[in-house]
Each structure stands twice: as C-alpha cells, then as structure tokens.
Image: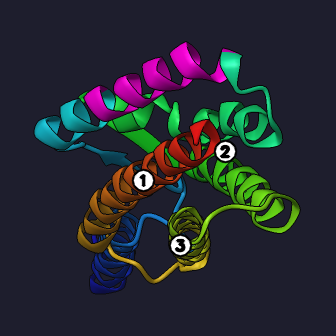
C-alpha cells in the first residue's frame, strides 16, 4: 500500500476509535448509538428500600379500609410510583430513555397527587409539614430526572453516580410520604 492509503486507514481507525470512546464515555450524547447505561444498584440500599416499601404498603392496606378518604385513595396511587422493580432489586438494570421516561412519568404522577392532597385536604400542622417536604422532594426528584434525561454531556461514571443518588432520593421520599401518612392517620383517629 502506498502512503496515502495508510494515512487514510489510520485516520479512519482514529476516528472510529474516537467515536467508540465518545459513545462509551457519554452514553446519552447525541452521537451515542444506544443511549443507555447498565446501572448496578447497591444491594444494601435495594434491600432496605424493598423492606421499607413492603412495610409501608402492608401498613397502608391494613389501615386504609377503615379510613376511606381522599388521602387514602391517592396514597394507593402514590404507592405505584414507589413500586418500581429497579428500586427493589440488586440486579443490574438498563437505563435507557424509555426507562427514564417511565420513571419520570411515575414521579410526575405522584407529584400531581401530592399537590392535590396539599390543596384539597385539611391537615394538622405537623401533617402539613410532612406533606410539604414530600412535595418538595418529589419536585426535586422530577428536576433531577429531567437533568439526567436531557443532559447529553453526562459521563458514564457521573450517570452511575446520579442513578445511585436517584435511588436514595426515592428512599427518602418514601420515608417522608410514610411519615406524612402515619401523621395523617394519627390525626384522623383523634
């Protein structure tokens, strides 16, 4: 081969390697072929989340029958936002744009329901505070998800870190909503 062909082959290989590197390093970038990342949840966090969720769900279903109110009704649907397999499993999960859209939809639906409770129901001050924090947390989660979903310059390492952070945000939101619901039940029984 002559020198020109070697140069062209070298440039082509360099561009291909560079493209593959960018594709790997920036999984959600506009040049990425498959906009996804394999997220490996922390097994301890996933197990703790699963335990917390199941405990709250069991508490809700064992007590909501006697309290047929808007809060009880909406809580059933808010629970759906927390009932996501990727939050309760230590198995790796592929986070692609479709998965992120599904998670975002669940968070937005939960936020809408929490806002409805804030404006349509009357609660004692302590219960209002829990609801306010739960609403703030859901808005923060929604913003965070939008940032992850719409930022093509996030690296693979940063994406993994952000998914771990998102996992913790769900756990905190679950605990806060559970505190709100328990406070609501106590005030309702008085």
Helix or strand or loop: what does disc 3 sit on? Answer: helix
Q: Which residue is mark 1?
A: 170
- Identify which residue is drawn at 60% across, 41% down: 81
Q: Is residue 135 visible?
A: yes
Q: Is residue 4 magenta?
A: no
Q: How far apart are labels 3 and 2 at the CA level?
A: 29 Å
* x, y percent for residue 39: 31, 46
Span of residues in magenta: 51-65
- Identify which residue is drawn at 31% across, 29% down: 50
Q: How far apart are labels 2 and 1 at the CA level?
A: 14 Å
Helix or strand or loop: what does disc 1 sit on? Answer: helix
- Identify which residue is drawn at 64% across, 23% down: 64
Question: Where is the C terminus found, in terms of image quarters?
Answer: top right
* x, y percent for residue 75: 67, 38
Helix or strand or loop: what does disc 2 sit on? Answer: helix
Q: Is residue 89 visible?
A: no
Query: In the image, which disc is placed on residue 40?
Result: none
Q: Is residue 53 magenta?
A: yes
Question: Where is the N terminus found, in terms of image quarters?
Answer: bottom left
The one of 29 and 129 positioned closer to us in this rendering: 129
Q: Which residue is mark 2?
A: 102
Q: Earlier in the sequence, mark 2 or mark 1?
A: 2
Q: Main secondary structure of the magenta part?
A: helix
Decide: few, some or many residues near mark 3? Use Cα within 10 Å; few <14, some 14-19, many ≥20: some
Q: Nearer the viewer, mark 1 or mark 3?
A: 3
Decide: few, some or many residues near mark 1? Use Cα within 10 Å; few <14, some 14-19, many ≥20: some
């Amino acid at each position: 081969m002559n020198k020109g062909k070697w140069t062209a082959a070298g440039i082509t290989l360099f561009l291909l390697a560079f493209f593959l590197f960018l594709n790997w390093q920036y999984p959600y970038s506009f040049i990425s072929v498959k906009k996804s990342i394999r997220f490996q949840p922390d097994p301890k966090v996933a197990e703790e989340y699963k335990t917390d969720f199941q405990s709250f769900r069991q508490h809700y279903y064992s007590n909501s029958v006697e309290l047929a109110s808007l809060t009880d009704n909406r809580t059933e649907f808010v629970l759906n936002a927390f009932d996501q397999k990727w939050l309760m499993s230590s198995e790796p999960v592929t986070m692609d744009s479709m998965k992120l859209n599904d998670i975002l939809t669940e968070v937005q639906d939960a936020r809408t329901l929490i806002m409805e409770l804030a404006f349509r129901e009357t609660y004692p001050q302590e219960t209002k505070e829990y609801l306010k924090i739960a609403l703030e947390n859901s808005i923060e989660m929604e913003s965070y998800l939008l940032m992850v979903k719409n930022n093509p310059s996030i690296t693979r390492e940063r994406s993994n870190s952000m998914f771990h952070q998102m996992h913790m945000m769900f756990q905190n939101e679950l605990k806060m909503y559970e505190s709100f619901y328990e406070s609501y039940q106590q005030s309702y029984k008085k």
